[in-house]
Image (cartoon, rainbow, N blue to C red):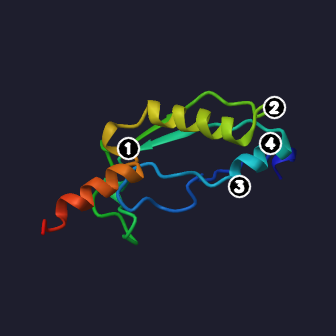
Amino acid sequence: WLKKGVPLMAFPEGQRSPDGRLMEFKGGVFAMATKAKVPIVPISLSHTHAVMPGSSLFPVQPGKGKLRVHIHKPIDPEGKTDEELVALVREALLSEMPEDQHPLPKANATDEIEEVKKLEPVP
């Protein structure tokens, strides 16, 4: 379908975010675009979680005046790896999303161990 010019809308995360923040991407969407040699057009959607949380079957409040959609310039997959496409799409999406929808920084293992040590009682 993609090669015939039929557009496909897909969410690269593969599921709804539980907290409204951008999650890690799955690779299928990027592989499809690369194989079909079609551009990827990132679309930033802002504040959707406030209107319809991931755990909800129906909107919890009206979206008028709250939701924001930004259509970015197409990204040509030719000559790019899936990892490069992921980075370009993520950068585009985040450029038009509010900070409260950006992923939280990942803690490294050392930081996590130090946090646990703080909670452990000292003998």
| Residue at which label 2 appears | 78
- The amino acid marked with disc number 2 is Glu
* Position above or below: 74 against 62: above
- The amino acid marked with disc number 4 is Thr
26 and 75: which one is in front? Answer: 26
| Residue at which label 3 appears | 28
Callout 3: few (<14), some (14-19), or many (20+) C-alpha neighbours within 10 Å? some
The residue drawn where x is 33% and y is 49% is 111
Tag nearer the camera, 1 or 3: 1
- Residue 81, given in percent of the width and then of the height, sits at 75, 37
**Marks 2 and 3: CB-CB under 8 Å?**
no
- Residue 20, given in percent of the width and then of the height, sits at 37, 53
- The amino acid marked with disc number 3 is Gly
> If you read the primary sequence from the N terminus, does the residue marked by circle 2 or circle 3 appear first?
3
> If you read the primary sequence from the N terminus, does the residue marked by circle 3 or circle 4 appear first?
3
- The amino acid marked with disc number 1 is Pro
The residue drawn where x is 40% and y is 47% is 106
The residue drawn where x is 45% and y is 48% is 22
**Marks 2 and 4: CB-CB under 8 Å?**
no
Tag nearer the camera, 1 or 4: 1
Q: What label sits on residue 105 in the rendered view?
A: 1
* Residue located farthest toward the front when viewing the structure as drawn: 123
83 and 117: which one is in front? Answer: 117
**In-image side of 20 versus 94 (left or right):** left
> If you read the primary sequence from the N terminus, does the residue marked by circle 2 or circle 4 appear first?
4
**Marks 1 and 2: CB-CB under 8 Å?**
no
